[in-house]
Image: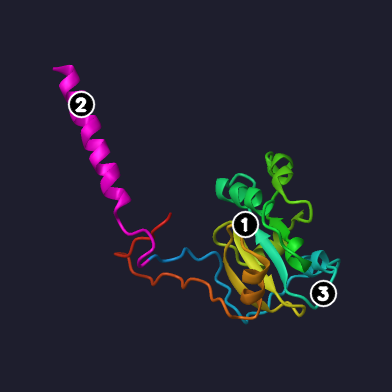
Amino acid sequence: MKNAKLYLLVAGLTAANIGFRFLPSDEGKIGIPVSHLEPGDRVESVELNQLLATATDPSQCRMIVAFNPDCPFCEQAAQRERFASRSGAYAEPLWVTDEVKPRLSTFVEFFAPGSHHAVAPEAFRALDVEAVPALFLLDGEGTLEWVGAYRGDESTEVLAARCEGLDQPIPAPEANPSTSLVGQ
């Protein structure tokens, strides 16, 4: 009798797993906002300006990735970034976090060779970070060109299109308590 209950449980879990696999995964997907900033907003941050002053080409769009060393999605993005072949400023992203955490020294080992990191609480606040990993693309004047979630495997072409305003971020969900966020 004990085995019959176990078999029923396994069969039920298997059926549920198969059912979930057939649910549409991308239809109607709403992105999770990573910041309240929008393209066209100017980011005012002394700390961020100092960090970006060393960029090889200050006129080119610059990548800032907000992260948390304890975030598994941030770690995955950092690992993917190692395999993304990028050129120019896109090969030198700046990763910023708001505080030193015990795992920071281990986390930075995942970064691609051209990546830089900084503990920059003022810059993190100026970017109004709500979720990580978050990608911010800024022009040479500090104007936000693109903001959204960061996967780490975006190509130079995708990033360049975002800097030119050709690829818009996923819109933030409406304030509706009955709407659930997919992908949380």
Which secondary structure lies at badge 1? loop
User: What span is in magenta?
Assistant: 1-28
Q: Measure how far apart labels 1 and 3 are at the Cα level.
A: 22 Å
On screen, residue 5 above or below 71: above
Q: Measure how far apart labels 3 and 2 are at the Cα level.
A: 63 Å
- Mark 3 and mark 2 in contact? Answer it, CB < 8 Å: no
The answer to which image quadrant residue 160 occupies is bottom right
Q: Measure how far apart labels 1 and 2 are at the Cα level.
A: 42 Å
Which secondary structure lies at badge 2? helix
At label 2, the amino acid type is: Tyr
Is 7 within the magenta?
Answer: yes
Which secondary structure lies at badge 3? loop
Secondary structure mostly seen in magenta is helix
Provide the residue designation for mark 1.
152
Of the pair 1 and 171, the residue shown nearer to us:
1
On screen, residue 164 above or below 84: below
Provide the residue designation for mark 3.
58
Q: Which of the two labelled residues, at mark 1 and mark 2, occupies the earlier sequence position?
A: 2
Q: Which of the two labelled residues, at mark 3 and mark 2, occupies the earlier sequence position?
A: 2
Circle on res. 78: none
Residue 49 appears in view:
yes
Residue 68 appears in view:
no
Quadrant of image for the C terminus: bottom left
Name which residue lies at 62% across and 64% down.
Answer: 135
At label 3, the amino acid type is: Pro
The answer to which image quadrant residue 50 occupies is bottom right
